[in-house]
Image (tube, helix red, strand yellow):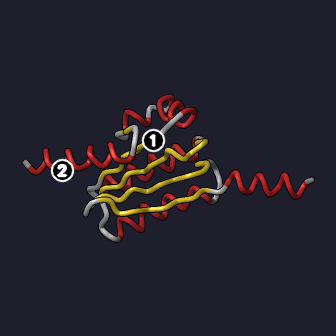
Amino acid sequence: MEEVGGTAAVQQRELNIQRRLIEPDNVVVEIVGRIVAGPECQQIEWLISDLLSQDEKKVIFDISGVSQIDSTGVGIIVMCFGKMKKAGGDLRVAGARGIVEEVLKMTKVDRIISSYPTAAAAVEGVAGQGKLSGA
């Protein structure tokens, strides 16, 4: 019985992170799982550092597959936003639902980081901003 419970706990903690290039300049980072205290959260920070080293500066976190976020997860997202801003880039969040959306609103992260209902809407928002600043 303990092995089954242990395995379930490990599976719950896993964080799956995939990135895909959208249009020429936008990277969507799909995050699935739980963004909670633990070594998994560091993957997100490392990914942002890697994207910046590749001169990718328009990043969208698609968190529609995130089932839980704690203060560490909120901190990681805000820290990644800060790194992107410092490098002259932009980070947006898309797809927050349920408890994840509530936590982002309670911590007022939604006032700092632009939030969209879907990754597609965030890509349009980034593209629209680029057109406005280029005009």
- Disc 2 marks which amino acid? Gly
The number of numbered discs placed on residues in the rendered structure image is 2
Q: Quadrant of residue 114?
A: top left
Q: Residue furthest left?
A: 135
The numbered dot on residue 130 is 2
- Alpha-carbon neighbours of circle 2 within 10 Å: few (<14), some, or many (≥20)? few
On the image, the x and y values in percent for residue 18 come to 49, 61
Q: Are marks 1 and 2 in contact (CB under 8 Å)?
A: no
Front residue of 95/132: it is 95
- Disc 1 marks which amino acid? Gly
Dot 1 or dot 2, earlier in sequence: 1
60 lies left or right of 71:
left
On the image, the x and y values in percent for residue 123 come to 30, 49
Residue assigned mark 1: 95
Name the residue rendered at 39%, 42% in the picture: 118
Mark 1 → mark 2, Cα distance in angstroms: 22 Å
61 lies left or right of 39:
left
Name the residue rendered at 18%, 50% in the picture: 130
On the image, the x and y values in percent for residue 105 come to 47, 30
50 lies left or right of 36:
left
The numbered dot on residue 113 is none
Name the residue rendered at 10%, 51% in the picture: 134
On the image, the x and y values in percent for residue 55 come to 30, 67
